[in-house]
Image (cartoon, grey):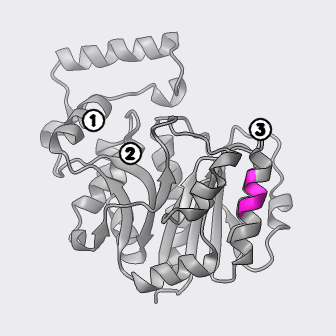
């Protein structure tokens, strides 16, 4: 039986001041919160975070070492979904530990009540762009991506040579791929029915999206857009993300009005370590909780 509650799935790896403020904003009896703390984090006290929660339930999933662009990103998302799915929530929201709601929980729950059954995720509808991205990211095996991450290291150069060798040998995972590939954002707000489909497609994901580069921006959008429930998808992840000023841009104190006046429900990204960062986060939290 589907619950009326929402599940927040949080991937966190840094800025625990911000994470604490985020948990306070999400602390609502209508929510359950699932948190993954990157295994690279050495000093981590789950009790300190649990003590913040008064109304919601909070759960910590098994910690793994998540690397930028690697399939560990996908594994982490699946671990969060698998932990939450047995309770059959009305909605599942994937956010990072440096994201923040920019609407109150009353507003967010009312929004999804009015739009019940609709899935929200950003996806590219350009077949040319999607295939170009797929050819770069998943056509050949990126066996070392979990090691290299963003680094331009000797290992990364070795990876590139191995990819060139695969191309010469005619290795292309896309040749027999049974689904049309779509790229998009990995952040989402999905229904229980759609999460069930995502979990059922894990075998496909392991075959075509593991050992890849940045396939966390491919696997879920591909499943969703090939779904029989494609008609209940809105091409909008409801996250305010500024790609014009950064990759993405980190919001500053002078962006407060822009954030509070946005039609989006969440925003990314933030940092308590920037000049005025803590003041921005606290001002947002106070405004959101007061509503």
**Disc nearer the start of the sequence (2/1):** 1
**Disc nearer the start of the sequence (3/1):** 1
Residue 287 is at least partly visible in this image: yes
Task: Look at the picture and state if 117 lies above or below 176.
Answer: below
At a point 74% along the width and 40% down the height, the residue shown is 41
At a point 31% along the width and 61% down the height, the residue shown is 235
- What residue span does the magenta drawing correspond to? 280-284
Q: Report x, y in % for residue 275.
A: 77, 38
Q: Which residue is mark 3?
A: 275
From mark 2 to mark 3, how far is it between C-alphas?
Answer: 31 Å
SS label for mark 2: helix
Between disc 2 and disc 3, the foreground one is 3
Q: Quadrant of the C terminus?
A: bottom right
Q: Which residue is mark 1?
A: 133
Contact check, label 2 and label 1, Cβ < 8 Å: yes
Q: Which mark is residue 217?
A: 2
Residue 20 is at least partly visible in this image: no
């Amino acid at each position: 039986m589907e619950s009326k509650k929402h599940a927040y799935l949080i991937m966190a790896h840094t800025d625990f001041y911000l994470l604490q403020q985020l948990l306070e904003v999400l602390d609502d009896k209508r929510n359950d919160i699932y948190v993954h703390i990157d295994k690279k984090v050495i000093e981590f006290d789950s009790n300190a975070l649990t003590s913040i929660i008064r109304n919601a339930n909070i759960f910590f999933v098994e910690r793994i070492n998540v690397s930028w662009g690697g399939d560990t990103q996908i594994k982490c998302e699946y671990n969060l979904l698998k932990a939450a799915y047995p309770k059959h929530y009305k909605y599942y929201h994937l956010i990072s530990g440096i994201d923040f709601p920019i609407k109150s929980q009353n507003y967010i729950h009312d929004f999804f009540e009015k739009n019940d059954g609709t899935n929200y995720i950003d996806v590219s509808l350009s077949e040319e762009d999607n295939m170009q991205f797929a050819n770069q990211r998943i056509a050949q095996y990126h066996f070392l991506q979990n090691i290299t991450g963003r680094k331009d290291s000797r290992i990364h150069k070795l990876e590139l040579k191995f990819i060139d060798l695969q191309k010469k040998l005619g290795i292309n995972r896309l040749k027999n791929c049974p689904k049309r590939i779509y790229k998009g954002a990995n952040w989402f707000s999905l229904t229980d029915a759609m999460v069930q489909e995502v979990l059922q497609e894990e075998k496909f994901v392991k075959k075509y999206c593991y050992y890849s580069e940045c396939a966390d921006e491919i696997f879920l959008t591909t499943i969703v857009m090939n779904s029989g429930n494609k008609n209940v998808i809105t091409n909008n992840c409801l996250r305010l993300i500024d790609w014009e000023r950064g990759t993405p841009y980190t919001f500053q104190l002078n962006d407060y009005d822009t954030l509070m006046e946005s039609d989006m429900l969440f925003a990314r990204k933030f940092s308590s370590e920037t000049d005025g960062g803590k003041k921005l986060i606290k001002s947002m939290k106070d405004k959101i909780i007061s509503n």
